[in-house]
Image (tube, rainbow, N blue to C red):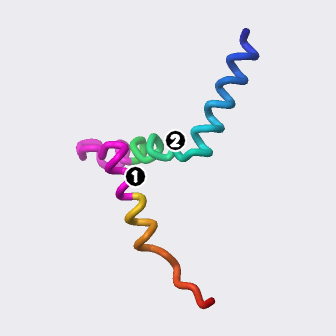
Amino acid sequence: MTTVRKLLGTVRWYVRELTGEAEYDRYCERRRRHCPHAPLPTRREYERMRTAHREQDTPSRCC
């Protein structure tokens, strides 16, 4: 039973990392450490910020 739980935990961790779901949790942890009184964005707001940041910081290509 323990090995099954461990396997499921590992699979869950892998899927969260692969899909980017864990990234929001890490962002919230960092934000709480650095700005404990600042409000946290919802997951949807975070995804919008992340997408806007990614589109804004697109490197220029020569080809």
Span colored in magenta: 31-49
- Frontmost residue, 48 versus 5: 48
Give the numbered dot on residue 29.
none
Q: List the residue tagged with mark 1.
A: 47
Residue 40: quarter of image:
top left
The residue sitting at 36% across, 47% down in the picture is 31
Badge 1 density bin: few <14, some 14–19, many ≥20, Cα 10 Å: few
Mark 1 lies on a secondary structure that is helix
The residue at the far front in this view is 63
From the viewer's perspective, tell me whether residue 18 is left or right of residue 36. right
From the viewer's perspective, tell me whether residue 36 is left or right of residue 9. left
Q: CA distance from mark 2 to mark 1?
A: 12 Å
The residue sitting at 62% across, 30% down in the picture is 12
The residue at the far top in this view is 1
Badge 2 density bin: few <14, some 14–19, many ≥20, Cα 10 Å: some
Q: Position of residue 14 (x, y in %)?
A: 65, 38
Q: List the residue tagged with mark 2.
A: 22
From the viewer's perspective, tell me whether residue 17 is left or right of residue 29. right
Q: What's the amino acid at mark 1?
A: Glu
Q: Position of residue 57 (x, y in %)?
A: 45, 73
The residue sitting at 73% across, 16% down in the picture is 4
Q: Is residue 61 above or below residue 47?
A: below
